[in-house]
Amino acid sequence: MPILLILVLLYIAVFWKVFTKAGQPGWAVLVPIYNGLIICKIAKKPWWWLLLSCIPYVGIVFSIWLINRIAKAFGQSAAFTVGLVCLSFIFWPMLAYGDAEYNSELLD
């Protein structure tokens, strides 16, 4: 049980940092549905993409697409997206605490 608590706290800290680097409120990571809306906002996609990511099978595609757009917004490659999906416990902290900067113009 303490290991789970540590993992949840690490998740909160990492995504808090990602949100603040993207110019969004860090506390949004603590609000369940609102944090999904913020993720869509960071990826410059409409709110209903959050609904699409909840559909079985289709949701996997849209979730990976959102993650790819977030990686692109931070100036990262498609290979980094694979890392975010497959080795998230390594790559999300790299994105949060590394020197990558958010630039929404990279998504246009």
Image: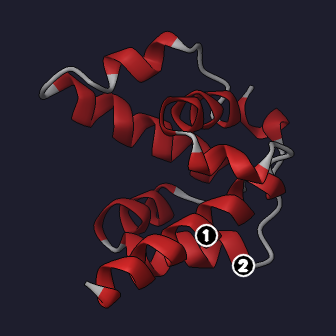
For the residue carrying disc 2, how many other residues have a C-alpha within 10 Å: few (<14), some (14-19), or many (20+)? few
* Residue on which disc 1 sits: 14
Q: Indicate whether 49 appears above or below 86.
A: above
Q: Is residue 47 left or right of residue 4?
A: right
Q: Residue at x 58, y 49 (%)?
A: 30
Residue 17, quarter of picture? bottom right
Residue 55, quarter of picture? top left
Camera-near label (1 vs 2) is: 1
**Callout 1 secondary element:** helix
Question: Residue 56 at x, y = what percent?
Answer: 13, 25
Q: Are marks 1 and 2 in contact (CB under 8 Å)?
A: yes
For the residue carrying disc 1, how many other residues have a C-alpha within 10 Å: few (<14), some (14-19), or many (20+)? many
> In the image, what residue type sits under mark 1?
Val
Q: Indicate whether 95 appears above or below 63.
A: below
Is the N terminus in the top left, top right, bottom left or bottom right quadrant? bottom left
Q: Residue at x 37, y 16 (%)?
A: 51
Question: Residue 96 at x, y = what percent?
Answer: 68, 70
Farthest-out residue, front: 1
Farthest-out residue, left: 57
> In the image, what residue type sits under mark 2?
Tyr
Q: Residue at x 36, y 37 (%)?
A: 63
Q: Indicate whether 38 appears above or below 64.
A: above
Residue 52, quarter of picture? top left
Q: Which is more toward the observer, 26 or 78?
A: 26
Between the C-alphas of marks 1 and 2, the distance is 8 Å
* Residue on which disc 2 sits: 97
Q: Which is more toward the observer, 85 or 18?
A: 18
**Callout 2 secondary element:** helix
Q: Residue at x 31, y 79 (%)?
A: 4
Is the C terminus in the top left, top right, bottom left or bottom right quadrant? top right
Q: Earlier along the polypeptide chain: callout 1 or callout 2?
A: 1
Question: Residue 101 at x, y = what percent?
Answer: 83, 61
